[in-house]
Image: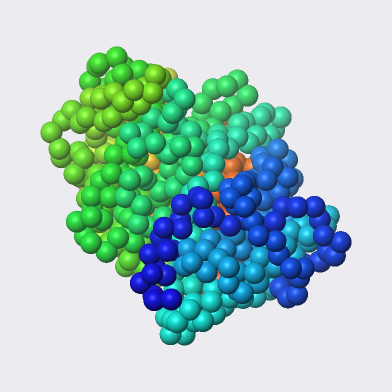
Amino acid sequence: MPFIMLRLNFFQALRPSHWMHGNNAQAATQTQTGPVVGNAPAPRKLSAADIQRVEPAGGWLSHLSQHAQTAQASSRSLHGLYALQSHKLEAAHLALHGFGLGDSTEAKTLHAMAEQLQAARFKTDRAVQPREMTANAKLSHDVRTVIATALTRAGLPAKLAQREAKASLQQASTRLLNQRPWQTVETRLQHNGREYSCTLIPAGQMKLGAADIFPQGYDNNGVCSASTTETRHAANLWLSELKDDADQTRFKGIRHGILSPYGVEDAQQRQAGALQRATEVATAALFSQPGTLQQALAGDTVTLRLTSTALVTPGLGGESGMLRDQVGAWRALTSAPQPLTLHIKNADGELQSVRVNLEVAAFNFGVNELALKLGMGHKESDKLNLEALHQLLGPDLKPGTAPGGWVGDYLAQNPANKKQVEIMAMQLQEIWAKQSHRSDGGEPYKAAQRVAMLAFEIGAVPCWNCKSGKDRTGMLDAEIKREAIAQHQGRAPSRPGVALDPEMRELFGKVLTQGGNLEVQAYNTGAPGNKVMKQLPFGSLLNLSYARRVGDVAAWQQAQGLSTLLKS
């Protein structure tokens, strides 16, 4: 089969009618104790109904619901691993069908592997063992090899077949993740006898009526972090909210992936995509302020201030270019004639134009090991941060100076939270004066956390992101919620870089594991777990301070989940 026809068939096959799905029939008589490759019963041919069905009794979506319902559900369970492996096999089926090889010997091999795995899922759930983690890596390799073998037999050179197998598998995985329903994540946690609710609303569930608010609808689906060429929608866009047991909002903001669709090679198309993504984030920010949104829908011109806090490291893996695309998109929106016109689907599902005076303070704080241990990227970031701090705090950033800028405007109203705002503003001044955001210092996210919380306290919308919107972004989400709960329970704002005491370590572990981040990560990859939770060689030379900030090994492992098995 000519290669050009293989490529054409692959992209045509990304329609849902071509999807393959593992067999969800009754359990086979033979069960396995772990991930399986090898001989299996002869597979049956699947119908379109099989292909598109998401079974309520199994799969990664049901595993997510288990996390939402039970705080003790393990993120490193055998069934969770099976769900990830099922996703890989389903993606492999889709890839082969896309190349027109759905009836090949290799497709039957994949189907046999899926049936064995489905049978094994009927074993009682338990913690994953190291040998099963190792077997998972073998399964991933075997799946790529099966696809490459099919392509080689179809006429592709071996090296090209290997590359195409890897690329097609990633594309198929991304499409499957994006085509499944993305639902609102609601979790609860308790601390010192008080209960808190954590709600994470994906873009496709940001609704005033039956449809989501965006001009190009999500149809209840999502855009996962691997969607690097997506130019219609922002990647991994969520509204994150924390409420206390009196139903009072303690924090609310918008989290997302990098605005740059960095997989697009053409610079003009990539920048246009970044502008579209930024427009969606601004629209989500307006949605997060219901009162302001209703004024806009009523015909008023409204002011929308938001902080954009990126968490990338310029100079690492192309993140410099991604950051420039993101900042360029914000500048394009804010430099356009104001008021800016946004388009929102109202409660009747009608597209309505609203007028917004948009102001954006755009920050970037590198928070990974290369930034905080090796000093990468700070020079480029701090040019951006200085401008943003002037917007937020005014031109004089000396510690103890009465803040100007947005904070000064807010304090002039003599608000009830004046003292809290003044403390956080002073802490940001101190962080900047000492340049302590350039090192770990016992608190990697010290500057980013205070920018986000200060923005919320003064009525602006905090937005934050890393490259993917799931790991570094999720860690900042947890740091914010830990601090917001602590302050709600009477603690003063924590001092930058001061070690967490035992109670705060316990609270941090709860937020990391029960605050909704595991579910967001699984929507993006097929498995829960944060890649920030890792231990590198050379101990304190490279490792960040999270082992000390979390303290508890069980909480660490639960937050880490199955992230070590994931590439994206």
Q: Nearer the viewer, residue 548 or 12?
A: 12
Describe the colour scheme in one phrase. Answer: rainbow
Q: Position of residue 486 (x, y in %)?
A: 57, 36
In this view, the residue farthest toward the right is 29
- The residue positioned 34% from the left and 23% from the top of the image is 350
- The residue positioned 49% from the left and 42% from the top of the image is 221
Q: Along the horizontal axis of the image, is 391 left or right of 447?
A: left
In this view, the residue farthest toward the top is 298
Residue 564 lies, with reference to residue 58, above or below; the image says: below
Q: Nearer the viewer, residue 493 or 450?
A: 450
To which quarter of the image does residue 130 belong? bottom right
Q: Nearer the viewer, residue 113 or 477?
A: 113
Residue 253 lies, with reference to residue 96, above or below; the image says: above
Q: Position of residue 368 (x, y in %)?
A: 45, 62
To which quarter of the image does residue 68 belong? top right
Q: Position of residue 99 (x, y in %)?
A: 47, 67
Q: Is residue 334 visible?
A: yes
User: How many callouts does the rendering have?
Assistant: 0
- The residue positioned 71% from the left and 29% from the top of the image is 193
- The residue positioned 38% from the left and 69% from the top of the image is 5
In this view, the residue farthest toward the bottom is 158
Q: Quadrant of the N terminus?
A: bottom left
Residue 526 lies, with reference to residue 8, above or below; the image says: above
Q: Nearer the viewer, residue 370 or 124?
A: 124
In this view, the residue farthest toward the left is 337
To which quarter of the image does residue 411 belong? top left
Q: Position of residue 162 (x, y in %)?
A: 48, 79
Q: Is residue 438 visible?
A: no
Residue 167 lies, with reference to residue 295, above or below; the image says: below
Q: Along the horizontal axis of the image, is 146 left or right of 457?
A: right
Q: Along the horizontal axis of the image, is 491 left or right of 281?
A: right
